[in-house]
Amino acid sequence: MAAMCDGRQVLVCAPTGSGKTAAFLIPLIANLGVGKGLRALVLCPSRELAKQTYRECIRLSAGTGVRPHIISKVSMSDNKFGPKFSLKFDLLIGTPNRLIYLLKREDSGLDLSSLKWLVIDESDKLFESGVKGFGDQLQQIYEACDPAVVKRALFSATYTIDVARWCKHNLKDLVTIIVGQRNTTADQVEQELVFVGNENGKLIAFRELVQKGLTPPVLVFVQSKERAKELFDELIYDNINVDVIHADRPQLQRDNVVQAFREGKIWVLICTELMGRGIDFKGVRLVVNYDFPNSAISYIHRIGRTGRAGRPGKALTFFTEDDRDSLRSISAVMKESGCPVPDYMLKLKKPKSNSRKRNQVIEREQISTQLKKKRKWKKENKTQNEFVKTTATA
């Protein structure tokens, strides 16, 4: 906080649940004070995180006179935009895509020339190759600012070489702040690796957890939206209070699911990496990595959804033979966090660089037996209908 209050550009790495959002919002609000026009911008990797940051900003800025705003459904909110748009708000929160959309609209009234601060939350995620073109987007956003005035701050729970290298080459008068050890998990999270053999073993292991008694709320992570749908199709038949969130669901549905989970109406929430970054659900007791994370960075962020703000939590990670190449890096993170890890895991050889692509996504067998039955029934029914039509024509 002190570095930003002094006007220094910062790169901050701190554990999940340690209060990074407040760490950049408080100095932003304090620096803005009473003024006129847009002077601060916060970029987030997802709409869910942007909305959460906006709620915190509303709470922290109460009584200060600072006017925050979030970019939401820009194509459906024309009445909010116009020549005086940038004069209506002091602090803007949104995702890069939506901000670029506004910058390209001649009638949006968005003017970043008076911007004093540009904050990038979960900065390592925004720089990942999966977020296409963010480097170009960031350059467009920065070019819309006044380089002589605007200062930049990057925050994340994990430290990556890509972000550090970019900061070194692009940020002057930089202060790097690292809280605790780099790329480790919170020590209040009890972590366990569970060998399940195969995909069917995952279902059996999860159902055993349910039989023993789950203490909600529980987050379950899978590697893709297709697998999220499949696992939901399977568990919905087990009389579990479960729902699913992924990128294919409309934004209104996603918002309603998140709200229901926060209120305790949903006990088990199946999700993808969409929920793995920055989202703060109060009191999540258990995180289950149904699918093994494809990197140590992903693992740290996933299990960071529990054990937040000093509360205890637990994380279970299922693994099969297919996950052998990633096992060593995850077990090393666990050991750094003080969790017991079998010696053989730490002694596993690193995969050769030419034998395994960075962050490669493993192709896994289908989860849902119910879905298999439905497809088999549709195929048999289709064949039978075709036979009836052919017979009738003859």
Image: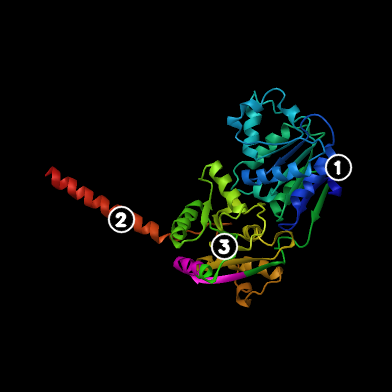
Magenta range: 192-207
Q: Rounded to the nearest whole Å, what is the CA distance between mark 3 and mark 1?
A: 40 Å
Mark number for residue 289?
3
Residue at image point 71% right, 50% down: 163
Along the polypeptide, which appears first: circle 3 or circle 1? 1
Residue at the disc numbered 1: 7
Label 2 CA crowd tier, 10 Å (few <14, some 14–19, many 20+): few
Q: In the rendered structure, does residue 202 fall within the stretch colored magenta?
A: yes
Which three-letter amino acid code belongs to the residue tagged 3?
Asn
Q: Rounded to the nearest whole Å, what is the CA distance between mark 2 and mark 1?
A: 65 Å
Quadrant assignment, res 170: top right
Observer able to see residue 351: no
Mark number for residue 313?
none
Q: Position of residue 60 (x, y in %)?
A: 78, 44
Say how the picture is coloured: rainbow
Out of 376 and 120, give the one closest to the viewer.
376
Which element type, helix, strand or loop, lies under badge 2? helix
Q: Quadrant of the C terminus?
A: top left
Which three-letter amino acid code belongs to the residue tagged 1?
Gly
Which element type, helix, strand or loop, lies under badge 3? strand
Q: Position of residue 211 (x, y in %)?
A: 51, 70
Which element type, helix, strand or loop, lies under badge 1? loop
Up-down relation of residue 354 to residue 120 (above or below)? below
Q: Rounded to the nearest whole Å, what is the CA distance between mark 2 and mark 3?
A: 31 Å
Q: Nearer the viewer, mark 3 or mark 1?
A: 3
Q: Nearer the viewer, mark 2 or mark 1?
A: 2
Q: Position of residue 95 (x, y in %)?
A: 65, 40
Q: Nearer the viewer, mark 2 or mark 3?
A: 2
Up-down relation of residue 32 to residue 176 (above or below)? above
Residue at the disc numbered 2: 377
Q: Position of residue 13 (x, y in %)?
A: 75, 54
Along the polypeptide, which appears first: circle 2 or circle 1? 1
